Amino acid sequence: MNADQMFSESITQKEKFWGKQADQIEWFKKPSKILTDDGINYPTWFEDGELNTCFLAVDKHVKDGFGEQVAIIYDSPVTNRIIKYTYNQVLENVSKFAGGLQKLGLEKGDTAIIYMPMIPESVFAMLACARLGVTHSVVFGGFAPKELAIRIDDCKPKAIITASSGMEVSRRIPYLPFVKEAISMSEHQPNYIVAFDRKLLGNRIDFKNDSTLVDFEKLLTESEPADCVSIESTHPLYILYTSGTTGKPKGVVRDNGGHAVAMKFSMKNIYGAKEGETFWAASDIGWAVGHSYSVYGPLINRNATIIFEGKPIGTPDAGTFWRIIEEHQVAVMFTAPTAIRAIKKEDPEGKFVKKYDLSSLRTQFLAGERCDVATLDWYDEFVSVPAIDHWWQTESGSPMLGLMPGIANVKIKRASAGKPIPGYDIKVFSEEGLELEPHHEGYLVIKLPLAPGAMMGIWGDPERFKFGYLSRFPGYYFSGDGAIKDEDGYVFVTGRVDDVINVAGHRLSTAEMEEVVSSHKEVAECCVVGIDDDLKGQVPFAIAVLKSGSEIDESVLEKEIVLLIREKIGAVASMKNALVVNRLPKTRSGKILRKLIRTMLDGKEYQMPSTIDDESIVAELQEKMNTYKKKYL
């Protein structure tokens, strides 16, 4: 069956197709209901099945005789350590840590937050939660305490699992102090903080004087192994927060059964990874890619996965990725275009690439934001393996657009994210909900039901789920992205249609950033837009109007706004620029014309909006922008 036939069957004979895919994993209780869809409630997959995701990722391979195969490769250029764990060793660590969590009273139905660096213990914690049916929420370590506090209050964890500190190229991230600060801000108070003491980095933890503080290592070593709990297919495996346009993060809920089926299907067919090979997704576990393709996908497919603690450049140089590919014989790699752009910037002539034997690398996948053609040209010239751009979201958990080298040779169209993946009946709609002809830009929507593994909803907020995703075009999931489809069925994603920006593959809310900027005592009103950036795809740019009578120096204000964003949102926001203006362009109803501001900042042609209240503001704004760009950009 070729990719087009596979896609056709997944749409016209959904239950038959996904029933066959469900047979590729081992169930404790095989589902008799493949799809439950009454046309009223949100469709669900495999609802009467029972399984355990940790069993599929670890125990099954040990049971099948692959216990001595390498499962996890920890490669940390920032600490100069490489450690390999076999499936036997992962099983011992995970089962004993799960036993430790049981001793603390955690059980199926509870939630736990994991706020940790890219170390093996983070993966052990995720798998231990999955083993018990404890729904985990991994929070990216780059988020500030305020952001962590919001998530604590939303998912109400019984425990927070963290580490003493994280290590980047030239700085340490104080994980445990951030957790304590976040808890001091939150209404919900977890019962325990389980902290891994990274003795190698110093700053030892004092466990003696705090009854809520538990030693991760001691808990693991002194506990009896826990068995896998049989989990309903629809039981939440994890909550993963993604930015929303209101500024309040949305907790995307992922199930166990559909997710496991999607992981096995995508690893085999979309990424073309063969069991036993090394697969590397260079992503933090705090993001959707890290969940799906640094942890669960590769392990369920019996691949060795690389947990990388470092950066594509500066640890120690622009050859780090290529060194890892050679040393660990990576067959398939997945990263964001940002990483390749950073390497290209440091090594435009490909000198570092030429130092390494990359013959093991079969395919390179890119996602997170659209990859520009210049970067693809550089990659093709110096690395010379297929680089496949594809598209998906935190909400889907696996690709929705892409190509399928696991099935056959693929035809790449550069700048396209590929064709719809089986299970995703993708259309391009007009504002009125009519399907557009090829080469017309519109809204990217997907006919329900979405494929297995896609979000079940938003944690604790079903109305927000319906309103945000399902209400605009009834019967369809609204992605929030614009797109164009060509006559061959290839889709070109044109970007967000709301006010969430994509910074190096990380979706961040401009509304949330505006709240922070407006909290400055000298700022009367503001807006934050995402502008084009060669390295990160987009970066936020703040425009501020000062309060009447303010005498603050504009350069001082800019520095203070940048620091505020770093403090309240985190360094991940990459805010560097703030421009002071006399007034903002608005519609007659008072809405800020963000698209106009963004277009002007990007130096692109624009039309005067018909809804603008005062056209003279545009010339005034352009003059300020030109002066700023000459001075700073």
Image (tube, helix red, strand yellow):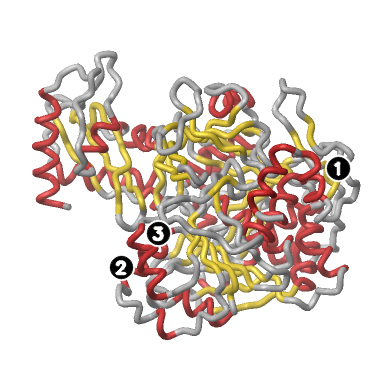
> What residue does disc 3 label?
338
**Who comes first in sequence, dot 1 or dot 2?**
1
Is residue 165 visible in this depiction of the protein?
no
Label 1–label 2 contact, CB within 8 A: no
What residue is at 87 percent from the left and 57 percent from the top? 227
The answer for how far apart the CA atoms under marks 1 and 2 are is 49 Å
Q: Is residue 598 left or right of residue 3?
A: left
| SS for callout 2 | helix
| SS for callout 1 | loop
> What residue does disc 1 label?
49
What residue is at 14 percent from the left and 38 percent from the top? 552
**Amino acid at pointer 3:** Thr
The answer for how far apart the CA atoms under marks 1 and 3 are is 40 Å
What residue is at 68 percent from the left and 43 percent from the top? 8
Q: Which class describes the residues within 10 Å of circle 1: few (<14), some (14-19), or many (20+)?
A: many
Q: Where does the image place residue 344, in percent across and percent down from the top left? A: 34, 69
Where residue 345 is drawn, which disc sits there? 2
From the viewer's perspective, is residue 59 above or below residue 504? below
Q: Where does the image place residue 195, in percent across and percent down from the top left? A: 63, 59
Q: Which class describes the residues within 10 Å of circle 2: few (<14), some (14-19), or many (20+)?
A: some
